[in-house]
Image: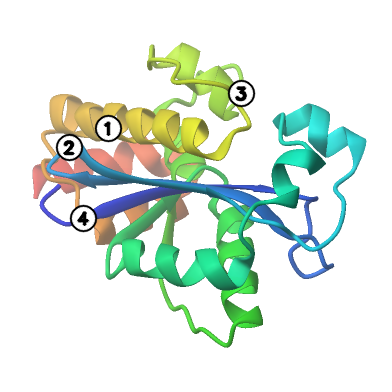
Amino acid sequence: MHQRTIVIDFETTGLSARGGDRAIEVGAVALVNGTVVDRFQSLLNPGFRVSAFIENYTGISNAMLADAPGSRQVMPRLRDFIGDAVLVAHNASFDQGFLQAEYQRLGLRDSHPFICSMRVARRLYPDAPNHRLGTLVEYARVPVCGQFHRALADAEMTACLWLAMLAQLADRYRIDPASPALLRKLQAVKISRAEAYLREVAAQ
């Protein structure tokens, strides 16, 4: 893992970035050579009150958001933090959608491809009860870091899960380092074909 990797997580007002939901917290963890080298966290004021459900689900209250910076203050700093790193997220289409939506509101462009730790986990841990982050943290014996559904804690645990999966690729298949290109291919391989695909890669 010689390239800088950013594991990112958003907490939001709802599920639809295109439907007007907004980010209310972002957490990101920078990895280099398998080590956490930096972290980024900020609340974001969405410009409207969040629902009681979201307050209870995330633990992020309207009172906390009232004095939080807005997207215009946070997103350029996040963009600088990300730089040209590889981006990883659990259920990446969700986080990618909110990252792009917040960028677009500010006229910023983003072409970062994401790697989805959930899709990779489905191929490496097919016997897990399910592939939600909390389940996989327990299944892979990843340390619990803080409160689930807070952005930095979820990013930290996703980063630990990611490193555990990279370690499995190295130990079981002798694929080390696992390049971003290989991981993007792996997440697109049919689950039933994943084992054979990894064996083929290992034999090359």
Q: Secondary structure at mark 3?
A: loop
Q: Is residue 129 or residue 84 the one in the foreground?
A: 84
Left or right, 44 with reference to 85: right
Q: Secondary structure at mark 2?
A: loop
Identified at 61% across, 67% down, the residue is: 71
Q: Tags 2 and 1 in contact by the CB under 8 Å rule?
A: yes
Few, some or many C-alpha atoms within 10 Å of disc 1 (few <14, some 14-19, many ≥20)? Answer: some
Residue 180 placed where, x, y %?
Answer: 26, 57
Quarter holding residue 176: top left
Residue 34, label in figure: 2
The residue type indicated by label 4 comes to Arg
Identified at 81% across, 34% down, the residue is: 55
Residue 4, label in figure: 4
Q: Is residue 168 or residue 60 the one in the foreground?
A: 60
Identified at 87% across, 51% down, the residue is: 49
Residue 131 placed where, x, y %?
Answer: 57, 29
Q: Which numbered mark, 3 or 4, is in the foreground of this view?
A: 4
Q: Earlier in the sequence, mark 2 or mark 1?
A: 2
C-alpha span from label 3 to label 4: 29 Å
C-alpha span from label 2 to label 4: 9 Å
The residue to which callout 1 is attached is 163
Q: Which numbered mark, 4 or 1, is in the foreground of this view?
A: 4
Q: Is residue 19 or residue 55 the one in the foreground?
A: 55
Identified at 33% across, 61% down, the residue is: 81
Residue 68 placed where, x, y %?
Answer: 64, 52
C-alpha span from label 2 to label 1: 7 Å
Residue 130, label in figure: 3
